[in-house]
Amino acid sequence: EDGSAIYIEHGYFAFDFPHERVNDTLGVIKLGPGYDTVRRALAEVRAETGIPLQGYGDIDADTVASITGLSPAAARLARQREFHETIVSRLTNREAAYVAAALASRGLRLTRGGRFFGAGGPGDKGTAVAALAKLFQRKLGPVELVGLGDSHNDVAMLTAVDVAALVQKSDGTWERVPTRGIRRVQGVGPAGWNDFVTHYLTHGAGQSVPRRRVRARADNVRG
């Protein structure tokens, strides 16, 4: 949920680190407030600004499936939020600025994803990557961090890794990002991710990923 938490299997790291127990299998490092806190803040911002903010928590799974293209089962899972709310309302740049300021005054943050805005804690995917990287460095020593994304809210993550790549969005374009040194990979969503990871594991980071012979179709990615 946009870097709001890190879930780690018990015993994965053979040393103590700050976290909370979730169940017999998982622990969690929380990097943001809970979902109910975010939802209450959005309700306050809605009343304060008059902007009709609608999130996953305001609509049923069938509506989520309809507007995202997710399957009904995937839409039900998408609504099971713990930290971060997806805002499905269309916002103008001016409205987004008002909402961002109102959320910031409450210690929260508005994010812009590939298709929707989101609301959550002050951290981001880069914060989560940095926290997790420290644990891996304690376990393994020096590590090379690899990150792939396709939207604006991935920029912090891509900045925090050693090897960063952008896959194509559903319309075949790449997100415009201000960070230099990010590779552009042909292939929409999972197709581009698979090509890059396969090539990286085989050849390392030194060689560019070959161009795809068949252009990925926009309907390869849902949501």
Image (spheres, rainbow, N blue to C red):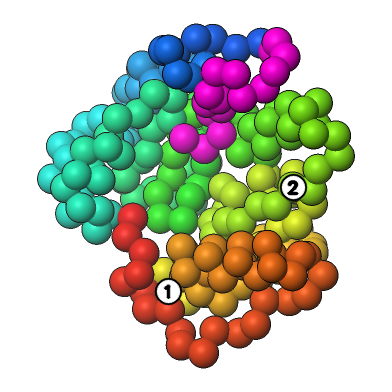
| Residue at the image point whose x is 56% and y is 77% from the top | 186
Is 102 rendered above or below residue 33? below
Amino acid type shown at disc 1 = Asp
**Residue 133 in the figure: left or right of residue 81:** right
User: Which of the numbered marks, if any, corresponds to residue 69?
Assistant: none
Of circles 2 and 1, which is in front? Answer: 2
Within 10 angstroms of label 1, few (less than 14), some, or many (20 or more) residues? few
According to the picture, the residue beneath numbered tag 1 turns out to be 171
User: Which of the numbered marks, if any, corresponds to residue 145?
Assistant: 2
Task: Specify the segment rendered in magenta.
Answer: 1-17
In this rendering, does residue 44 appear at all? no
Q: Position of residue 159 (x, y in %)?
A: 74, 49
Residue 35: which quarter of the image?
top left
Is 3 rendered above or below residue 5? below
> Going from the N terminus, do you reach mark 2 or mark 1 first?
2
**Residue 120 in the figure: left or right of residue 104:** left
Q: Position of residue 70 (x, y in %)?
A: 25, 53
Residue 201: which quarter of the image?
bottom right
Q: Camera-side residue: 6 or 138? A: 138
Q: Quadrant of the C terminus?
A: bottom left
